[in-house]
């Protein structure tokens, strides 16, 4: 005969106290008696939070009157806990440097010659701000040697693990001349390291800059790397490489133009408080030209108390991946210009008559458009055979003439001649005319034939 003990779940005389959670340490004792499963470290935070919740419910049940049920007490605890969590979250967001209203940045840049090229202001505005993604716009205005430049861009950023990735597109417009360019950029930012790359292309064609030059925004690209010390984020360093394509590109806005110039820039920055950043950079090109620049940058975050932006303790948060969410796009906001010489000198050599006879004198007619005086005249072609003769001044393109040579009866003689002219003005500009062909007409002769064919007395 086999006797079995009744299941405890079916025992009806089990006593349940009026305050089942009267002992706040009940769950802690039960948890301590459980066997180790090998992942205590991973769930330590969750176990601690669970014990805190049980303790809070037990204290609420013990302090309440016995008329209130356990469900009622649990509901009261849940409401109070939700209220406290919301309150703490509001306080944390109010103290955070991450403002949902965007960020404004004012830049003061000056080089060693006292020029403020690159100084300006920018405003980044978030339009669709979600937990893992951000859609934003950026508007800026910056000063250049050629006037004020406006920058208008749209972009997106999203979180991918420990990186903040993004892309953007901008249009830059020079208000004085109306010249425009477009750019496409990519970003990959971490807590201590940032990578940015941009490609620039002109939208406007060539435009007259002065009577002798034309200009447009140059085509090129740049790659920038920025880093911050993990133990001292106030100090930052950057390296930037830029390459522009064109025959006469002024990379430094210095008046010196080069073919396909490139430059390497080293920079350091110091941020004592989130509101203020000091910077210094040294830029050198492959042509040997260099430029040093100092900068002061004011970074104002809308909706964030000024006291938080002036606190040195918040610099690390501003440099973090979360704190840099609303930082400005890293790009060159001041366009690099490309130049070329205007066509201020042109010449057309008039086509002569189709029929020319040997020994005939022919004046040469030139149609010239020149912004500067002509200082030199050079002829190319069969100049000796055509006996070119200048006017009173050999450097005057007008008044020249030629004499056609006699017809050449030798076999294989072409009896045609070619001619063109090159002019040079006082600015050193040179232009060559079209080529003309002068064709001799074969002289008309009467063949006398046999003189005796009409002689009736001839045998």
Image (tube, rainbow, N blue to C red):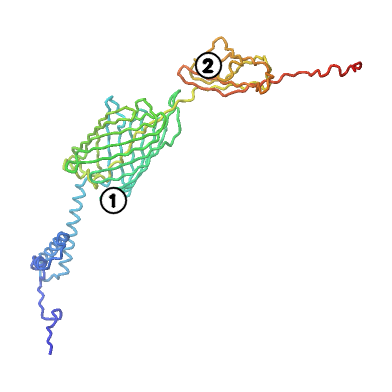
Q: Is residue 112 left or right of residue 396?
A: left
In this view, the mark in front (2 or 1): 2
- What crowding class fits label 1: few (fewer than 14 Cα within 10 Å), some (14-19), or many (20 or more)? some
User: Residue 414: horizontal and vertical position, in percent?
Assistant: 65, 23
Tell me which residue sits at (30%, 45%) in the image: 188
Front-lying residue, 380 or 183: 380
User: Residue 251: horizontal and vertical position, in percent?
Assistant: 35, 30
Q: Which residue is mark 1?
A: 159
Q: Is residue 337 left or right of residue 238?
A: right
Q: Which residue is mark 2?
A: 377
Q: Quadrant of residue 230?
A: top left
Image quadrant in which the C terminus is located: top right
Q: Is residue 455 above or below residue 130?
A: above
Residues at badges 2 and 1 in contact (C-beta under 8 Å)? no
Give the secondary structure at mark 1: strand
C-alpha gap between disc 2 and disc 1: 69 Å
């Amino acid at each position: 005969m086999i006797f079995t003990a009744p299941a405890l779940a079916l025992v009806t005389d089990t006593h349940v106290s009026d305050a089942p959670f009267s002992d706040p340490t009940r769950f802690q004792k039960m948890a301590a008696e459980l066997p180790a499963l090998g992942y205590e470290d991973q769930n330590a935070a969750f176990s601690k939070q669970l014990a805190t919740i049980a303790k809070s419910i037990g204290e609420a049940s013990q302090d309440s009157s016995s008329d209130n049920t356990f469900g009622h007490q649990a509901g009261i605890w849940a409401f109070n806990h939700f209220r406290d969590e919301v309150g703490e979250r509001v306080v944390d967001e109010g103290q955070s440097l991450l403002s949902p209203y965007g960020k404004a940045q004012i830049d003061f840049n000056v080089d060693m010659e006292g020029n403020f090229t690159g100084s300006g202001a920018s405003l980044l505005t978030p339009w669709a701000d979600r937990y893992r993604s951000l859609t934003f716009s950026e508007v800026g205005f910056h000063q250049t040697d050629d006037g004020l430049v406006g920058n208008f861009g749209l972009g997106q950023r999203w979180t991918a693990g420990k990186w903040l990735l993004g892309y953007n597109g901008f249009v830059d417009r020079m208000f004085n001349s109306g010249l425009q360019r477009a750019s496409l950029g990519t970003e990959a930012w971490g807590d201590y390291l940032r990578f940015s790359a941009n490609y620039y292309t002109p939208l406007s064609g060539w435009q007259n800059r002065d009577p002798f030059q034309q200009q447009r925004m140059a085509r090129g690209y740049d790659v920038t790397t920025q880093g911050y010390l993990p133990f001292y984020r106030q100090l930052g360093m950057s390296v930037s490489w830029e390459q522009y394509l064109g025959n006469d590109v002024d990379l430094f806005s210095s008046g010196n133009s080069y073919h396909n110039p490139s430059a390497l820039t080293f920079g350091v920055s110091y941020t004592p408080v989130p509101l203020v950043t000091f910077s210094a950079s040294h830029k050198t090109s492959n042509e040997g030209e260099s430029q040093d620049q100092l900068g002061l940058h004011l970074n104002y975050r809308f909706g964030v108390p000024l006291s938080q932006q002036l606190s040195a303790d918040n610099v690390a948060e501003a440099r973090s991946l979360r704190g840099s969410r609303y930082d400005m796009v890293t790009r060159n906001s001041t366009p690099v210009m490309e130049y070329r010489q205007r066509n201020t000198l042109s010449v057309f050599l008039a086509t002569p008559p189709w029929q020319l006879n040997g020994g005939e004198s022919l004046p040469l007619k030139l149609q010239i458009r020149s912004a500067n005086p002509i200082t030199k005249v050079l002829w190319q072609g069969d100049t000796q055979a055509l006996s070119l003769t200048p006017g009173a001044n050999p450097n005057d393109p007008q008044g020249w003439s030629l004499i056609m040579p006699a017809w050449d009866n030798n076999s294989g003689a072409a009896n045609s001649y070619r001619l063109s002219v090159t002019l040079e003005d006082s600015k050193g500009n040179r232009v060559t005319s079209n080529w003309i062909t002068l064709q001799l007409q074969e002289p008309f002769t009467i063949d006398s034939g046999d003189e005796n064919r009409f002689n009736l007395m001839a045998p």
